Image: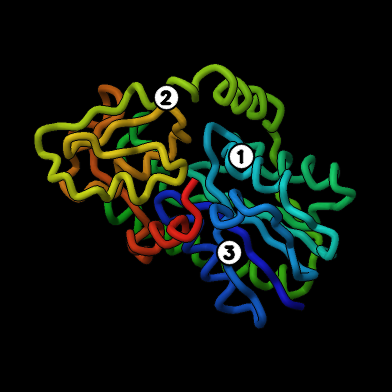
Amino acid sequence: MKTTIFYFSATGNSLHVAKAIAAQIDGSTPVPMLRSLNAETAAAGTACTGFVFPTHYFGMPPLVTQFIKKLDMEQAQYSFAVTTCGSRLINSGLRQVGNLLRQKGKRLAAGFHIEMISSYIPLSDLPPLAKQQQRLAAADRKIENIIGAVRAQASVYEPEYLWLPSVAINNFWRQKLLGQADQKFSCSSACSSCGVCEKVCPADNIRLVKGKPAWRHRCLECLACLHFCPVHSIDFGSRTAGRRRYHHPAVQVSEIIKAKASNPR
């Protein structure tokens, strides 16, 4: 069955998953959600439709919500979702996708969590490199299981036991915190004015002003700008200085830029 895999990825985890699934399912295509957000219409033109996205504040990123609400799913017969996360224990992303699909008269047939490397370093530093490699290897094994389930059109729905508080936290973040999030960003004198931060930002929230990044208060708090800065000149709050940066090792910055290049927001 032909498959369209819609993905959103800031630091590469979800892009890696989407590419890996697409590579092993015949007739499968990974499509960045960003390319459809400003188009007049967006449609799932295949019978099998997948959504791959990161967990932000224990739930779905607002951009993903916006995309799914817009998406015409008339042709979709089997839908699945994959959330990438630092920990699957506190999550509501699958339930949120399921609720949105029900509003369209559709059902989320399968849902999965993949524990990878959390890029939210304001909360905690990255694990040691050996630990990262172990976790990413385990994630790749999980991807193989997901591919088998999707090929079989299986109904597999991984539980979200703490979905109710997770939804509450996610909603509070969206409504009360996100609008002021980019006030926490700062840029040091190490900045080389390369413009990578502006190019990777999925919200088109950054402009270079006199060679330095200026944030325009429409942030998604994905931290792509922080992690892809080649000289580590960007910090978020008081806890990221000196902490290591991360992007999925199999994903290049050019791929993140390309996902939004055809349709800047």
Above or below residue 144? Residue 38 is above
Closer to the camera, 196 or 231?
Answer: 196
**Could you tell me if residue 114 is visible in this image?**
no
- Left or right placement of residue 76 versus residue 238 in this view: right
CA separation in Å, label 1 and label 3? 18 Å
- The residue pinned by badge 1 equals 60
N-terminal of the pair, mark 2 or mark 3, is: 3
Element carrying mark 3:
strand
For the point 27% across and 50% down, the residue is: 196
Q: Which disc number belongs to residue 181?
A: 2
* Left or right: 40 in relation to 262: right
On-image quarter of the N terminus: bottom right
Q: CA distance from mark 2 to mark 3?
A: 28 Å
Residue 116 position, x and y percent, is 46, 52
Residue shown at the point (67%, 68%) measured from the top left: 4
Residue type pointed to by label 3:
Val
